[in-house]
Image (spheres, rainbow, N blue to C red):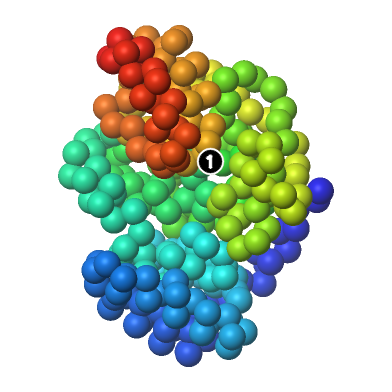
Amino acid sequence: MKINTNHLFSIQKPPFLSNCLRFIGRLVPNIKYIRAIPNRILKPINSLLGFRGPYIVKIDEFYMCLLPEECVDGNLYFSAHLYDRKEILFLLKRFPKDGVLIDAGAYKGYWSLKFACRYPNAMIYAIEPNPYVFDVLKFNIKINGYKNIVPINLGLSDNEEELYLHLNLSGNLGGSTFREGIIINGDKIKVKVAPLLKIINEFNIEKIDILKLDIEGFEPRVLSKFFSQAPKHLYPKYIVLEMHFFLLLIFLMNFKKIIEWF
């Protein structure tokens, strides 16, 4: 499949009414049920009005190119202040000024941009396998002029090879996965993958303050290989990942081994 990135040349600012919806979204508090308003109400209204983007919008202190109808994009477009709120606030307070963040499954770069903006002396490695999304990631880095983000167009696995990336084309492109049988009606593309330690060595990374993994179920495969081979000085101070139910089971089954790693 050939990924189309022509839309990057037709980016515009959001229309007035769409900006009004964004303004409402930014007022939504972090309260159960109420915080669902942007996704449940504002996003559908925006779509009904035909405001599909892509748009360049200011998110916090930086700019991003977003498609409001996409799942992650929509959350950032209408209510970025609620997106991964607890995790980001916790880590921003503990991240050193010259820290190193590995953002695996970077998507369009929100985490990378957030930390690069707040800590200009830090180094951010943004890993994204999807070539379509990777083009947008590079664009978002470029329009902000950040020099401390290194974009890497690779996937993570336990071996260096090529795998099919199954694309979620139902409004959640960030949910694309290497796992078979998860996405039934999507398309797929072959991309290069590599173990985390190989990328670390290639880029001469000497420490990891935060390892953020959003790799749609490949976390056990990647972490198992990494901790079985990496020297202890490369162990991340903090690991952030999406806890799938099956991933929790794997961790519980291997709890003793995980404790031994540390």
In this view, the residue in front, 166 or 1, is 166
**Which residue shows up at 56% across the image and 52% down it?**
174
Above or below for 158 versus 238: above
Q: Position of residue 84 (x, y in %)?
A: 34, 53
In this view, the residue in front, 223 or 94, is 223
Horizontal side of residue 251 vs 13, given as left or right: left
Which quarter of the picture shows residue 209? top left
- Quadrant the C terminus occupies: top left
Quick check: can you spot residue 187? yes
Above or below for 200 versus 85: above
Q: Amino acid at mark 1?
A: Glu
Which quarter of the picture shows residue 181? top right
Horizontal side of residue 209 vs 186, given as left or right: left
**Which residue shows up at 38% across the image and 61% down it?**
62
Quick check: can you spot residue 203? no
Q: Position of residue 135 (x, y in %)?
A: 63, 51
Q: Position of residue 34 (x, y in %)?
A: 30, 74
Q: Residues within 10 Å of mark 1 (few under 14, many from 20)?
A: some
Horizontal side of residue 91 vs 38, given as left or right: left
Q: Position of residue 200 (x, y in %)?
A: 47, 22
Circle 1 — which element?
Answer: loop
In this view, the residue in front, 34 or 124, is 34
Which quarter of the picture shows residue 75? bottom left
**Which residue shows up at 58% across the image and 26% down it?**
157
Above or below for 220 versus 17: above
**Which residue shows up at 28% across the image and 78% down it?**
27
Number of marks: 1
| Residue, far left | 93
Residue under pointer 1: 216
